[in-house]
Amino acid sequence: MVSSEGLCGSQPPIAAPVTQYGVTEPISMAGPTAADIQRSRDLEKFLVQAGLYESKEEASKREEVLGQIQEIVTNWVKQLTRLRGYTDQMVEDAKAVIFTFGSYRLGVHGPGSDIDALCVGPSYVSREEDFFFVLHNILAEREEVTELQPVPDAHVPVLRFKFSGIPIDLLYASISHLVVPHDLDISDISVLYNVDEPTVRSLNGCRVADQILKLVPNVEHFRTTLRCLKFWAKRRGVYSNVTGFLGGVNWALLVARICQLYPNAAPSMLVSRFFRVFTQWRWPNPVMLCAIEEDRLGFSVWDPRKNPRDRTHHMPIITPAYPCMNSSYNVSTSTLRVMMEQFQYGNNVCENIELNKAKWSALFEPYLFFQSYTNYLQVDILAADADDLRSWKGWVESRLRQLTLMIERNTYGKLQCHPYAQDYVDASKPCAHCAFFMGLQRKHGEIVQEGQQFDIRGSVDEFRHSISMYMFWKPGMEIYVSHVRRKQLPAYVYPDGCKRSRNLHLTPQQPSYKISRNNGVAYQAESGEKCLKRKKDPDGENSEQSRLDKRRSPDRNQSVSPEIVSRKLGSACTGCSTSDLDEMNRLAEANTSSNSSGISSCSHEDIGNESTAGSSEGSNVGDNNPSSSQSDSSDELKSSVEDEHADQNKVFQDGLLKDLEPKTVVGVVLKSMNGVVDSESVQNPVIRLSLASTA
């Protein structure tokens, strides 16, 4: 008799279960092709040539600095232990432990990057007195320490300084231990027992960084992709937590999610899939690396079912460590719109790279912000010296995104704003100075009558009130808000001091946002003679080519913006396949169902929930610490559309208010009278933006 085993032969091996990373199954388990591997090599070569990797000498110096800081904080804790009468054995065992987080912990820092560090100390060493007073004084006496700036009132309290030239952001967390173990596991939830909210936020940066590294399939591929995407975001002007875009931890979480969805992909594939996925993502469905852990210790977690304010978030990117929260709380409708446009730009370029129609350098073309709009809002910040400007600028910068919200809310979304994350310095001014700019344009497709204009006097006045809340104002700290057109932009916003040509060209090789260049080099003048001519005639208004362009242009009254360009190119771009779109829609719905809640978008009119990230010193550790983007709302800004002052927020005023010429200062915000900060009354603080105006 023949057994069944003889008929079937040996039993087939049982396949090992595939590890699932994240809350859904992967989109694809495919590995790289030979072409993908070559593109990944080319990408890494480009990143090295771009100077994104630090030298071995600088890496050794960072380790040495961290060792010195570890020694300083340990001696500090021993000193406090002795002063408080503890036993000699306690003094001997007393210690503090330094942990790192942010880009340094994730392994994606570059030359000149700061180190985000957390000092964990015993329960009897306080933050308010011991950290910000005793340790501050110890550091101030060290000759290696410069630019020491305590920020005790920040959402995440921080000591900022440079140690031997390396920038350090040092946080403090006092845990419920009399002696801090040298092998403390900061990922263990027990470190959160009996601690306050600021301590939780301080610990969260390290806990999130550790979880990210545990939740990605391939750490090296994750690091290369993240380094690439951070560089891209900075070049395209969408890297800034405080301005309302995304900071370091946000980009890390997005990249980690792509690594989960394509666990076997090479870096070049991950970069391409990043743009493919997030151009189709159905915001505000959340991005999550793991399921949200339920409330265990009484701390608030992100949950739209229970927290109405969580339903107003536009771009939820949820941290993976308890207590889970939205790390991208600052994102608004304005900044989300800009980021989606840039994602589409990246997707178009990556498609051309995969078709061998473009090289990696095309992806990192700088975004020409000052050629993209006709009208701009210029915010000049002045102070008596560099130290005052540092704190004053931080405060104003943390409020700029609220100005964006106010303008769009008060114009019912008809006037759109694009805040630019970079600041510019006018070295010719006798006092310390910097300036921020905001692009202004009419909402695409909005039908208005000829000659109608926007009055944003109420928005500027409301912004002034917000700025006047600064508790550490000093004489010389001033702010000016003015409306400028493109041809009136100051020369210091251009890299070589020469204003660029306004002509916009689209080429097959670069099918989106391509600005005309001479000799193929961005920001490069052809010769000194031509550069000099531009200085005399910045926009080429008298040139023959300019006159020809005017004749050819069908509508010179419309601002040339990224949105308009991308819409013109929409039919020419291949985009993702239908199957990819369906797959991502399924993933978005799976993310939503995993939270068992529907998330409704918040309109730009609701600014009552806006964060006051940045503290009284205007500081924010938000690019690396996800907790810092969720701060308490300012009482000054807790107003909805229903209780707005009708006389301040008129839209489309016609002939009722005196016009303000472009480049006219809207208002000087603060003055000092007898040592008391007061708001100066502003004469005619009106910006009339004609929709028919041209640069």
Image (tube, rainbow, N blue to C red):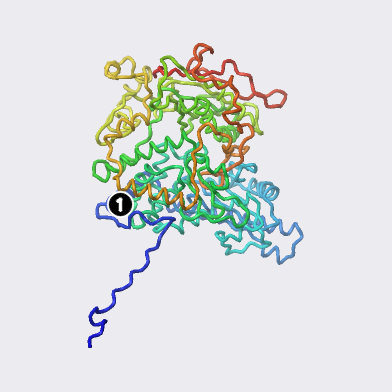
Residue 536, quarter of picture:
top left
Question: What x and y, as percent, mark residue 642?
Answer: 59, 28
From the viewer's perspective, is residue 225 above or below residue 12? above
From the viewer's perspective, is residue 489 above or below residue 261? above
451 or 345: nearer the viewer: 451
Residue 310, quarter of picture:
top right
Question: What x and y, as percent, mark residue 491?
Answer: 43, 24
520 or 559: nearer the viewer: 559
Residue 189, quarter of picture:
bottom right
Q: Residues within 10 Å of mark 1 (few under 14, many from 20)?
A: some
Residue 109 visible to the viewer: no
Query: Image check: 430 left or right of 135?
Result: left
292 or 348: nearer the viewer: 292
Q: Quadrant of the N terminus?
A: bottom left
| Count of labels in the image | 1
**Residue that protrudes farthest toward the front in the picture:** 1
Question: What x and y, as percent, mark residue 397?
Answer: 54, 34
Residue under the image location 52 percent in, 22 percent down = 456
629 or 654: nearer the viewer: 654
From the viewer's perspective, is residue 115 above or below residue 639? below
Q: Which residue is mark 1?
A: 41
**Residue that protrudes farthest toward the right in the picture:** 85
Query: Image check: 137 left or right of 598?
Result: right
In the rendered structure, which amino acid carries the disc numbered 1?
Arg
Residue 620 visible to the viewer: yes
Query: Image check: 238 left or right of 312?
Result: left
Question: What x and y, as percent, mark residue 36?
Answer: 28, 52
Indicate the secondary structure of the residue bearing disc 1.
Answer: helix
Q: Quadrant of the C terminus?
A: top left
